Image (cartoon, rainbow, N blue to C red):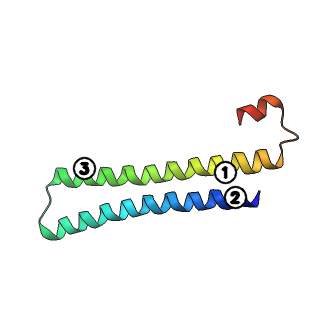
Amino acid sequence: MAEMTAILTDTLMVKFSRAISTVLSLMRSLEEQAVGERARPEELSLNSYVLLQAYILMAVTGLGYLALTWSTVVLLGGFVTSLGNKDFWCL
């Protein structure tokens, strides 16, 4: 069970590092553009929207991994003997 937790933790770290690097590269490109020339308002609006969507995607992905980790490790690992057949397959 400890190995499974370690594997899931490593997977989470890899996913979050990829998402964070994507957001940081987007922010760097926005800063470079702001230094070079003044951006149009619609472009700034679009870039802000894309950045917001990236943060929302990171949050939803993290919650999904946490739900998967919780359901597999805690419920199936700790209470598998007390779960009914229907409850087991719902998880």
Earlier-in-chain disc, 1 versus 3: 3
Residue at which label 2 appears: 5
Residue 52 coordinates in the image, percent (x, y): 37, 52
Per the image, the residue denoted by label 3 is 46
Q: Quadrant of residue 35?
A: bottom left
What's the amino acid at mark 1? Thr
Q: Is residue 87 above or below residue 58?
A: above
Q: Which mark is residue 69?
A: 1
Q: Check the picture and name the quadrant holding the N terminus.
A: bottom right
Q: Residues within 10 Å of mark 3 (few under 14, many from 20)?
A: few
Instruction: Report the Cα–Cα distance between label 3 and label 2.
Output: 39 Å
Q: Which mark's residue is nearer the viewer, 1 or 2?
A: 2
Q: Secondary structure at mark 1?
A: helix
User: How many residues crowd mark 1 within 10 Å: few (<14), some (14–19), many (20+)?
Assistant: some
The disc label shown at residue 53, or none: none
Residue 82 is situated, as x and y percent measured from the top left of the image, at 88, 40
Disc 2 marks which amino acid?
A: Thr
Q: Is residue 6 left or right of residue 29?
A: right
Would you place residue 55 above or below residue 84 in this image? Answer: below
